[in-house]
Image (cartoon, rainbow, N blue to C red):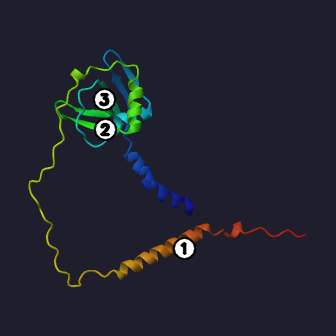
Amino acid sequence: MKRLSLCLVLALPLALAAAAEAKEPVSAKVCGGSDCRTVKDREALMALAEGGPPADPPKPSAFYRADLTIRGDGELFTFPVVIVPEAGLLRGGTEAEGYTWMPVSANGAVELRQMTRGLEPLPAAKLDGLDVRLPGAQVDEVVLPPAEPQSSGGGAPVWPWIVFGLAALGLLAFAVARLRRPGPSQGSPEPAEG
């Protein structure tokens, strides 16, 4: 019973973390110039959702549109994405909220090419968001941290923490040893006479 309790106590934080991160892409509708297809392959969907840090837009290039659907907190959310396989870039956002260009990994670029294979791309002339540029670094004000007061040797001593830590380690070692020691009914068998 003690082992079961210990396992449950150790596994509970992992279960709660998994439930909190239950946001995942479930499908995407990828469209080219004349046709669309629905994508449900997990690797392909992750390529659409993975974008890296913001990047400058590509030169005008043929592209594809996609509507990426993500499940999170029991609801479905759909986001527009533009795929530029030739440049290895994705564009998220809308004209109203602004566009963000993001690079994809080498594996993501392979997945994007596979999901758009056989679709006629949209013409480069229709690609929006090419005027978006990353802002340059700008320093408006420098704020220094407050000066540290001179230490007069005050403050809490460290030794109680060391003693407490050693005691906790000793208790942990004792608990592990007790869990590993066989009980009275699990003794070693008697040697055979013979």
Which residue reaches farthest front? 59
Whole-number angstrom distance, CA of label 3 to CA of label 1:
60 Å
Locate residue 3, reporting x and y percent.
56, 61
Relative to the observer, which residue lies in front, 132 or 187? 132
Q: Quadrant of residue 4?
A: bottom right
- Say if mark 2 contacts mark 1, CB within 8 Å: no
Q: Nearer the viewer, mark 3 or mark 1?
A: 3
Marks 3 and 1: CB-CB under 8 Å?
no
Circles 3, 2 touching at the beta carbon (< 8 Å): no
Q: Secondary structure at mark 3?
A: strand
Query: 170 left or right of 130?
Result: right
Above or below, 193 relative to 84: below
Helix, strand or loop at label 2? It is strand
Q: Quadrant of the C terminus?
A: bottom right
Q: Which residue is mark 1?
A: 174
Q: Left of 98 or right of it: where is 170? A: right
Foreground mark, 2 or 1?
Answer: 2
Q: Which residue is mark 3?
A: 84
Give the mark nearer the N terminus: 3 vs 1: 3
Instruction: Please name the residue shown 48% across and 58% down the image.
Output: 10
Q: CA gap, disc 3 to disc 2?
A: 10 Å
Give the SS element for disc 1.
helix
Quadrant for the N terminus, please.
bottom right
Q: Nearer the viewer, residue 44 or 57?
A: 57
Tell me the residue that label 2 is attached to: 103
Can the viewer see residue 25 in this picture?
no
Write the residue at 19% across / 30% down.
Answer: 130
Which three-letter amino acid code belongs to the residue tagged 3?
Val
